[in-house]
Structure formats: structure tokens, C-alpha cells
Amino acid sequence: MNRQNKSNLKQKLLFSSSILLAGMLTLSATVWVLTDRIKAEAQVARNMRTQQLLRISDVELNVTRASLQLRQALLARSLAERDAALADAGAKLELLDKILENFGAALDEAESRQAFAPLPGLLRNFKQTVLNNKQLILEARQDDAFAFLNNSTIPARNQLLIPLGEEKQR
């Protein structure tokens, strides 16, 4: 009877071990598949989302630089400084067109395209206010130019930055 109990115990242990081994194999296969899925999602995030965030930051940076160059032109100590600041502001505006064009072309999600839709109009508005501000600076109407910068150009810049900030948070 002792041998029969040992034999039953061996069979029970063998069966239990087999069940545990099958469970561990199933778990490892499941983890493998989930890990591959996470890798694929990380690749998409790296290729798509990171690039989109870089484009957004390029737009934000150049919009801010353009408005800061207007302020620099107002504070310039010489005509050469003023002209250099205005030229740099103009260069930033041209660069913004290219960046925004590339940004729009790279969008593949409907939500992103919807968030992008107002940006070209907001950029046109910002560019026009910058050009108007630039004209006031060139006419040496410093007080008017400074008031226009604070009352029109900076709010136009902020309006352009709002949808970009929202898209970053999405």
C-alpha cells in the first residue's frame, strides 16, 4: 500500500507539474505577444508623435522669436541693429511658412488634421500684424509700434500658439 501511495503521489506531482509548466508556457507566450505590441506602439510614437511634437515646437519657437525680434527692433540702439532685428523677424516668418507646410503634410490622423485646420489662417493673421508692426517701427513711430506690439502682435501670437498647445496635450 505504501508503494501505491508513492505511485499516486508521483502521478499527482507529475500532473501538477505539467499543469504548472503549461500555464507558465502560456503566460510567457502571452507576455511575448504583448511585448511585441508595445514595441510596435512605441515605434509609432517615436516615428509619428515625436516628429509632430518637434514640428509644433519649431512653430512655437519661431513665432516667439519673430515677436521678440520686433521688440528687439524697438529697443535697438542703432539703425543697423533695428534693421538686423527686422530682417531676422522676416526670416522667421518665411521659415514658419515652410515649417507649417511640412507640419500639415505629415499629419495622418483626422484629429491632428482637425487641430491643424485653423493654423494657416492664424499664421496669416500673425504675419500681417508683424508686417504692420514692422511698418510702424520703420516709420520711427516707437510709441505706436510698442502699443501695437502689445495690443495686436502679441495677442495674434498667442492665438496661434493656443491650438499648438492643445495638440501637444492630446
Image (cartoon, helix red, strand yellow):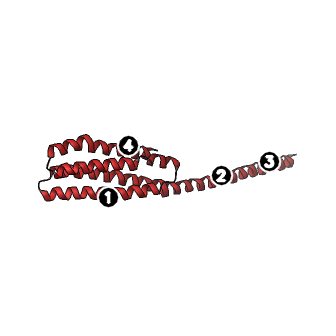
Question: Does 136 sit above or below residue 80?
Answer: above
- Of tags 2 and 4, the one toward the viewer is 4
The kind of residue on which mark 2 rests is: Thr
Is there a contact, CB below 8 Å, between mark 3 and mark 1?
Answer: no
Identify the residue at horizontal 14%, vertical 59% (top origin).
80
Identify the residue at horizontal 27%, vertical 52% (top origin).
66
Name the residue beneath numbered marker 1: 94
Name the residue beneath numbered marker 4: 162
Identify the residue at horizontal 71%, vertical 52% (top origin).
21
* 99 sits to left or right of 32: left
* 107 sits to left or right of 70: right
Q: Earlier in the sequence, mark 1 or mark 4?
A: 1
Between the residue at mark 2 and the residue at mark 3, the CA separation in whole angstroms equals 27 Å
The foreground one among 8 and 152 is 152
**Could you classify mark 1 by the number of other residues whose Cα lies within 10 Å: few (under 14), some (14-19), or many (20 or more)?**
few
Name the residue beneath numbered marker 2: 30
The kind of residue on which mark 3 rests is: Lys
The kind of residue on which mark 1 rests is: Glu
Q: Position of residue 62 (x, y in %)?
A: 31, 54
